[in-house]
Amino acid sequence: MKLKSLEIDRQTGLLRGSTCLCSPHCDDRPQGVGISALVIHAISLPPGYFDTGAISDLFLGCLDPDAHPYFREIATLKVSAHFLINREGRVTQFVPVIRRAWHAGSSFFEGRGQVNDFSVGVELVGSDDTRFAESQYATLASLTWALQAAWPAITAERIVGHSEIASGRKTDPGPHFDWLRYRDLISPG
């Protein structure tokens, strides 16, 4: 599988050559807190549907509650992620990496709460019931390399699933996410 080269501007936190849709659901990271973790999520809206329009609308704060019965439950949530990778492997940015996206919720990692403070959130379009696409793994690996190049504290040991930092509350990226395959793709050499 050929991996594409991605680069993130460390000063702006933006993925070069990509447009940021700029979610309002973010804020400044706390002073003196470095970026040192990557959290992998999975999302589909409504559940089981893989069109990215509703996901974008949710992250941008403009999800129509009348478009689907499930949306009535979530339309007022203020959530976001730094990046979304669709089923074809296309990446969309919603929050500059230097800012805090609201992706982890109530969470703990290595004894620290407030995981949003020091992490990057990447959403994969998918669900607990489906396998992820090859193109998603390729883009996720390329994006991981770009993040690690800009913020070396994001080591392989500091890449986790949402389920690991919000145990009992979240299940994503789910049982069909192939951690061995992903870790093989991001390993040096």
Image (cartoon, rainbow, N blue to C red):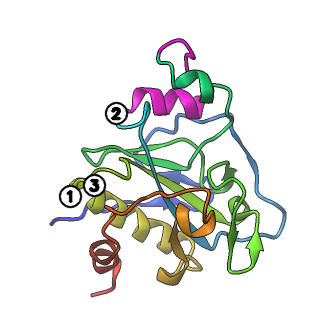
* Residue identifier under label 3: 132
Tell me if label 1 and label 3 are in contact, CB under 8 Å: no
* Residue identifier under label 1: 134
Callout 1 crowding tier (Cα within 10 Å): few <14, some 14–19, many ≥20: few
Q: Nearer the viewer, residue 10 or 56?
A: 56
Q: CA distance from mark 2 to mark 1?
A: 18 Å
Residue 94 occupies which quadrant of the picture?
A: top right
Tell me if label 3 and label 2 are in contact, CB under 8 Å: no
The spot of residue 153 in percent (x, y) is 59, 79
- Label count reads 3
At label 2, the amino acid type is: Tyr
x 42%, y 67%: residue: 144
Q: CA distance from mark 3 to mark 2?
A: 13 Å
At label 1, the amino acid type is: Glu
The spot of residue 18 in percent (x, y) is 42, 43
- Residue 34 to residue 18: above or below: below
Residues rendered magenta in the picture: 52-67
* Residue identifier under label 2: 49
x 51%, y 25%: residue: 70
At label 3, the amino acid type is: Phe
x 47%, y 81%: residue: 156
Callout 2 crowding tier (Cα within 10 Å): few <14, some 14–19, many ≥20: few
- Residue 75 to residue 100: above or below: above
